[in-house]
Image (tube, grey):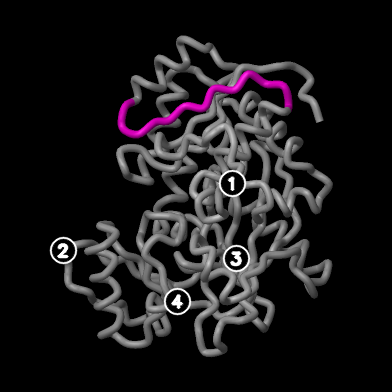
Amino acid sequence: MSSPRKMKIVVLMHEDLVPPDSIEGMSEAQVTPFKTEFDVVVTLREMGHEVYPLGVSDDLGVLRRAIEQTKPHVCFNLLEEFHGLGVYDAHVVSYLELMRQPYTGCNPRGLMLAHNKAMSKMICRYHRIPVPRFGVFPIGRKVRRPKKLGFPLLVKSLTEEGSVGISQASVVYDDEKLAERVGFIHRTVNTDAIAEEYIDGRELYVGVLGNDRLQVLPVWEMLFPKLRDEAPKIATDKVKWDVGYQKKIGLDTQLAQDIDEGMRRRINHLCKRIYRSLGLSGYARMDLRLTPDGRVYLIEANPNPNLSYGEDFAESAETEGIEYDQLLHKLINLGIGYRLRGQA
């Protein structure tokens, strides 16, 4: 597919993830860290665009100079952190807005709300969107579990994404293990911790595209066919990023089976409500749990999810008839068409 017009596009990414021109001869494990960046840059070039990969770490001057020099039609935002902190990506997007520079993906307010797992859950609870009960455990305070918060609990970082700090040991069954795991998050991730009731059920992912008018992609499911029966079925750090471990447990993601039309409509409606409640834009992925008795819970809302070719979001879009280049083109159009709140 060719874009209707050739555009100048700055692809914004972490400086350590600027991809090589070719990955020939590289192993899957070597490519995995920058696969999204490579797929997006190569595909945009194949679409006929003038593409400028830009690595950013802790200096916004690099971004300003690139925009002033190239005068891009849009910045394709793949940046997930700034100065080593994931929550700072929202400020980079705010900087783009201050420069009146169109960009792809979520707006800064939506990023900030979604990054804070407790805040996003409180907003969703206000809107009667089902979320697990939870408690927040700040750094430097004694771990005291709220009486209404029952076991088992899943302990993770309050603000980090990508399953950072999550392992099978993150699911705890008593107060002693809860305190241990909260301490682990404080020491190793250096953020506050959140513990939410573990919801046993199917791990579903649902992509959403749009600013005002929303398109919900087909329901996707993560499967763990070779994981031992007693192990919690959760997307740990190793499940997401360790290629060898993925093969060991037979990790697979696919179009969710055995979900009737009524449930699909419920899930689609729920995902639109979540998206709008958190003020998201561009694109996002909703991580849901479907219990055996048919209840659906929001676990996390993830703006700007993994865009690698062949991963959940792109695969789900392709099932809907949206090829990878068409998906990127949609995201570009959404970025160019996004209006700041209150802007005429």
Residues under numbered marks 3 and 4 in contact, where contact means CB atoms less than 8 Å apart: no
Q: How crowded is mark 1: few (under 14 residues within 10 Å), some or many (20 or more)?
A: few
Mark 2 secondary-structure assignment = loop
Q: Is residue 55 magenta?
A: yes
Label 3 element class? strand
Neighbor class of circle 2 (other Cα within 10 Å; few <14, some 14-19, many 20+) is few
As drawn, the label of residue 288 is 3
Q: Which quarter of the figure is the N terminus placed in?
A: top right
The answer to whether residue 272 is magenta is no
Residue 232 in view (yes/no):
yes
Tell me the CA gap for discs 2 and 3: 31 Å
Q: Which of 202 and 275 is in front in this view?
A: 202
Name the amino acid type tagged 2. Answer: Gly
Q: In this view, does 127 lie to the left or right of 197?
A: right
Q: Which residue lies furthest to the front in this view?
A: 25
Q: Give the range drawn in magenta.
A: 47-59
Q: Mark 2 points at which residue?
A: 140
